[in-house]
Image (cartoon, rainbow, N blue to C red):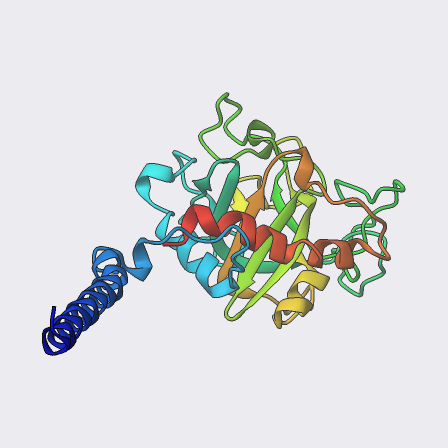
Amino acid sequence: MSSTRTRIALAAAGALALATQFAVANAHAAVPHAAATPHTVSAQPVAADTTYTAAQVLAGVKSHSTTSTKVNTKPHINTMTRAMNVNVYQVATGVYAYSSSMAIDDDGSDPDPDPDHQGQTTFQDSNGKQLGAHHVPYYVLGDDCWDKKSPCPHFFYKEHGISGRQFALVFYKSKVIGAIFGDTQTGNSQTTSSNDSRELGEASVKAASLLGIPSSGTTGGVDNGVTVVIFSGSSWVVNGTNANLSNNAQALVQKALNTLGPKVVG
């Protein structure tokens, strides 16, 4: 082969190799684009360590509070307004939510100027001491089944794996706190007041103050806008004393948001 033909052959071979490399490079560059086309961000699974905000979870709770998830068959009484328009929903397995008022409970071991103040609460701290309404954020549920039936037409805590010091998230406007089940509303057997166990919408002085709600037992509270989300089961019972139950409950808030978030958000 002459040198001229050799150079032409070498040039042709080089051009072919360059064209091949260019084609391969273009093919490689095209793969990610083609593979990404059918996928969107919304289609991706939520990471296990996703941190959920109070606003996200509250919106999810409200979206799951529907006729199909309602637990009670008869409406509860809004403690502040006395309207029979409060319902309880099972928004996820073992998680129950209701929206109502916040009347102020000042009972327990803390002194209070309220003339209706009582020195006892239905449940006690881990040392057996009466809860202090000014130190412990707690919520109130009905003491018994007002209808004296089983299953109860109203939401009755004993039928749903809920016991004393059961943890709950409490939402109001832009805030969320942790609270425990601390006291109960008058039962059928009690005649000390006109209250009854169908009421929902009461919590302690401490719960109100943490949420920015007027906390006086005689003049405080709000008529509506408070949402309580109760986590049933023994693993969500909060232990501690009057001195640290509030801190222990607040320490569970983000855990509760992250536990419930994947079940109700998106």
Residue 86 in view of the camera:
no
Question: Would residue 206 be visible to someone looking at this image?
Answer: yes
In the rendered image, which quarter is residue 20 located in?
bottom left
The relative height of residue 48 versus residue 111 in the rendered view (above or below) is above
Residue at x 59%, y 46% (from the top left corner): 194
- Residue at left 88%, top 45%? 129
Q: Position of residue 138 (x, y in %)?
A: 69, 52
Q: Quadrant of the C terminus?
A: bottom left
Q: Residue at x 18, y 72 (%)?
A: 10
Residue at the farthest top position: 150
- Where residue 75 appears, as percent x and y from the top left, is 41, 41
Asked where in the image residue 246 lies, by quadrant, the reply is: bottom right
Name the outermost residue toward the front. 2
User: In the depicted view, which residue is nearer to us: 97 or 237?
Assistant: 237
Quarter of the image for residue 153 reads top left
Left or right: residue 260 versus residue 7 is right
Figure label count: 0
Q: Does 33 sit left or right of 109 as displayed?
A: left
Q: Where 236 sits versus 149, above or below?
A: below
Whole-percent x and y of residue 148?
Answer: 53, 24
Locate residue 168 relative to residue 57 in the image: left or right.
Answer: right
Q: Is residue 185 left or right of residue 39?
A: right
Give the quadrant of the N terminus: bottom left
Q: Nearer the viewer, residue 60 or 223?
A: 60
Q: Is residue 54 above or below residue 95?
A: below
Q: Residue at coordinates 53% horizontally, 65% vertically from top-left?
A: 172
Residue 254 position within the rendered picture, expressed as x and y whole percent measured from the top left: 61, 58
